[in-house]
Image (cartoon, helix red, strand yellow):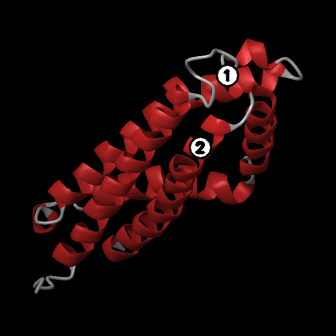
Amino acid sequence: MRVFALVAATVTTGVTSGLFYTYASLTPGLRTADSMAVVQVMQRLNVAVLNGWYLLGFVGALVSTGVAVVLHLPSDGHRVLPAAVGALVCYTGALVATRAVNLPLSQALAEAGEEPGRTGYSEPNDPGGARRVRWCAVRALLSTAALGFLCWALVMHCDVSPT
């Protein structure tokens, strides 16, 4: 059961980390676009990403990592516990960033309709949404760190000697 939880956590965190990495990699390209184009692209992406597959990875990573931590609490699982806890902390940080920054920005975009000035993207010093770009990178880094911790937890669980 422990290895299943670790594998599920690794896979779902990897999927979500990949999505966050994609956002972090692509959003800087919007810096050269005009405000209306940025609003339209981000509105469409934000609508498209809200689906069952995204939810499965997004929530599944948190739940399965939490389950992996709980399953490794007994003394015979303590070897894996630091890596599993590290993954949970990093992934929770990515969720906090999403909730505190990315979701409000997405909501502002959704409410902007055809008025990009209401989103903050029309400001001369922030044409491509530098704040969004920064926080997409934070989410990508935190979720990638969580993925690394989970990979290490699997190595520790399987008692594989890294070479």
- Crowdedness near tag 2: few (<14), some (14–19) or many (≥20) residues, C-alpha within 10 Å: many
* Residue 70 visible here: no
The amino acid pointed to by label 1 is Tyr
Q: Position of residue 66 (x, y in %)?
A: 37, 51
Q: Position of residue 49 (x, y in %)?
A: 71, 49
Residue sitting at x 74%, y 45%? 45
Q: Secondary structure at mark 2?
A: helix
Q: Residue furthest right?
A: 114
Q: Quadrant of the N terminus?
A: bottom left
User: Residue 66's mark?
Assistant: none
Name the residue tied to disc 1: 121
Q: Secondary structure at mark 1?
A: loop
Is residue 104 depicted above or below 132 in this figure? above
Tell whether 10 sits left or right of 125: left
> Which one is in front, 97 or 44?
44
* Cβ atoms at labels 2 and 1 below 8 Å apart: no
Is residue 27 depicted above or below 4 in this figure? above
Tell whether 22 sits left or right of 39: left
> Which one is in front, 50 or 7?
50
The amino acid pointed to by label 2 is Thr
- Crowdedness near tag 1: few (<14), some (14–19) or many (≥20) residues, C-alpha within 10 Å: many
